[in-house]
Image (cartoon, rainbow, N blue to C red):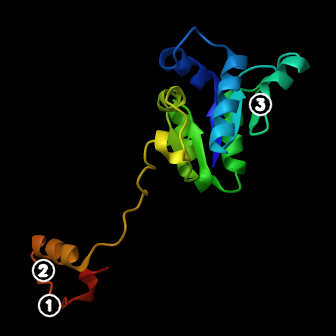
Amino acid sequence: MVYLIDGNNLLYAAHTHLPGPAIGRQRLCEILADWARQTAADLTVVFDGPPPRPGVIQQMQAPNLTVVFSGPRSADEVIEELIERAPAPAAMYVITGDRAIQSAARRRRCRCLTSADFARGLASPPPSTLSENLPPAPPPEKPGALLPEETDEWLRRFDFDPDQPPDDLDLIR
């Protein structure tokens, strides 16, 4: 599974939901790298602003963790661009509390988790499978087809006889 994380948003949530002293970007990346290693997930975390010194960036990176800095653009712009370019958006979780990013993610059929929910999952014991600490995926936007008995019930509610075909085809159009 692939995770695209709003870094500053998660950092703010981590202050509330992760035990211990307040953490910074580098410590958050260490926590995320641990979690990625334990779950075999691929994480990309996007922070606002220019990158730190090269040595600091190297300390923040890990095999399953890519750290991106937005430079002169906002992290939100970079995240939305990454969502748009995602080759398999349905296999991606977007972690943010930002409604505009959540909306962009849902348009591409990405799964969304709030930063607070994800931070609570990070604070939990490591999962043996990826889905144990995550809430269930949201239901599909469009529900499946009705069962025949459900269709009959709706026809009855609108005063149609389910056993009688309509006389006028214009009623169906």
Query: Which x, y percent locates residue 75?
Result: 69, 28
Considering the image in quadrants, where does the C terminus appear? Answer: bottom left
Q: Is residue 62 left or right of residue 6?
A: right
Q: CA distance from mark 1 to mark 2?
A: 8 Å
Badge 3 or badge 2: first in the primary sequence: 3
Q: Residues within 10 Å of mark 1 (few under 14, many from 20)?
A: few
Q: CA distance from mark 3 to mark 1?
A: 62 Å
Badge 3 or badge 1: first in the primary sequence: 3
Q: Residues within 10 Å of mark 3 (few under 14, many from 20)?
A: many
**Badge 3 vs badge 1, beta-carbon distance below 8 Å:** no
Q: Type of residue at label 2?
A: Phe
Query: Which x, y percent locates residue 49?
Result: 75, 20
Secondary structure under the numbered disc 1 in the rendered image: loop
Secondary structure under the numbered disc 2 in the rendered image: loop
The label number, if any, that marks residue 73 in the structure image:
none
Q: Type of residue at label 1?
A: Gln
Nearer to us in this view, 9 or 78 = 9
**Badge 1 vs badge 2, beta-carbon distance below 8 Å:** yes
Nearer to us in this view, 80 or 56 = 56
Query: Which x, y percent locates residue 12?
Result: 56, 18
Q: Residue at x 55, y 32 (%)?
A: 96
The residue furthest top is 21
Q: Which residue is mark 1?
A: 164
Reply above or below: 130 against 9: below
Foreground: disc 3 or disc 1: 3
**Badge 3 vs badge 2, beta-carbon distance below 8 Å:** no
Query: Which x, y percent locates residue 76?
Result: 65, 31
Q: Which residue is mark 2?
A: 160
The label number, if any, that marks residue 68 in the structure image:
3
